[in-house]
Amino acid sequence: MKRLFIIGAPKCGTTSLSNWLAGHPAIHFSAIKEPHFYATDLRNRPVADPVRYARLFESATDEVQFHAEGSTWYLRSDRAIPAIIDQYPDARFIVLTRDPVTMAVALFFHNRNKLYESRTDLLDAWCQSSDASGMGTGSDAEPVFTDYRRACSLGSLLDRLYGWVKPENVLHIRLEDMSADPAAEYARCLRFLGLSPDHRTDFAAYNSGWMHRSAGMQRFFKKSAALARKMGLTQYAGLKNLIIKVVFGRRLDARPVSDEAIARITEDLRHETRRVDELFALHGGRGRA
């Protein structure tokens, strides 16, 4: 069975693309979208047991050609991709990126919502990115979640990726392109995988900025999610997210960010932004019609 990994980056559209690909009859997507099984340098992997990981794909039908999963921190992990290549030398990888500056902003507010980030000021969090003291109280928080500088160093992370994986086995998609023409980028994915079109017309966005109405409600769902994982209830996350959106949640509006913060992050990521553009020009056209 062929293997497909959507490896990040976080807040770059991986959940939407994973949901679209999961609907293709030749792709069986992991019952848990982000098991992070191969990221052994993470402290709280949702799935660490090999037997349980294998069970995430056990309901695949005969027409399936790819087993797929979408662990967004694989790109950042020092161990995940080498471990995957060691086990599956011809695995396919899809990596999504966006402007690193807007990624930093989105990731900060995501972490605040998830209780991974205790600092309230973006610039403060950015300047202390490698300081784990800002990590929030979420039981599944990871130090890497709030290391914004490293997570948003997309040019360096892509350079490392292409050092590990043959370029022909990597498809690079920019969130800006996927937002502008999702059908075209989805078609690129299918061509990259050698799969026939499935004539999908629904390209709804998933996970596009929902927040809880209270921190207490967030803590309740996080504790119940941790219990569900221990019990092996793989469908809990989807049910939880639906309840949050319909009953307890509200969509995030654009939040004001200081000009000082944007200027500082833009300057610090100038090289990374340029390198992402260079690598996309070199490799990113793969799969275009």
Image: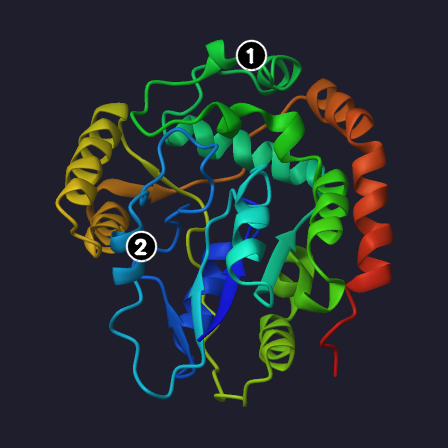
The residue sitting at 69% across, 21% down in the picture is: 261
Tell me where residue 254 appears, x and y as whole percent: 54, 38
Q: Can residue 11 be seen here?
A: no
Report the side of 83 relative to 219 (left or right).
right
Task: Give, as a three-letter code, the residue at label 1.
Answer: Asp
Tell me where residue 108 appears, x and y as whole percent: 53, 29
Report the side of 61 relative to 182 (left or right).
left
The residue sitting at 46% across, 50% down in the picture is: 71
Name the image quarter holding the N terminus: bottom left
Q: Name the residue carrying label 2.
A: 53
Task: Give, as a three-letter code, the residue at label 2.
Answer: Tyr
Report the colour scheme.
rainbow
Of labels 1 and 2, the one closer to you: 2
Report the side of 101 relative to 235 (left or right).
right
Up-down: is 76 above or below 91?
above
Tell me where residue 286 appears, x and y as whole percent: 75, 72
Q: Can residue 130 be seen here?
A: yes
**Would you call the spot at circle 2 few (<14 residues within 10 Å), some (14-19), or many (20 or more)?**
some
The residue sitting at 32% across, 24% down in the picture is: 138
Q: Which mark is residue 131?
A: 1
Up-down: is 180 above or below 64?
above
Comparing 179 with 227, the one in front is 227
Nearest to N terminus: mark 1 or mark 2: 2
Up-down: is 204 above or below 113?
below
Q: Secondary structure at mark 1?
A: loop
Task: Measure how far apart labels 1 and 2 are at the Cα level.
Answer: 32 Å
Q: Secondary structure at mark 2?
A: helix
Tell me where residue 144 appears, x and y as whole percent: 52, 28
Up-down: is 57 above or below 1?
above
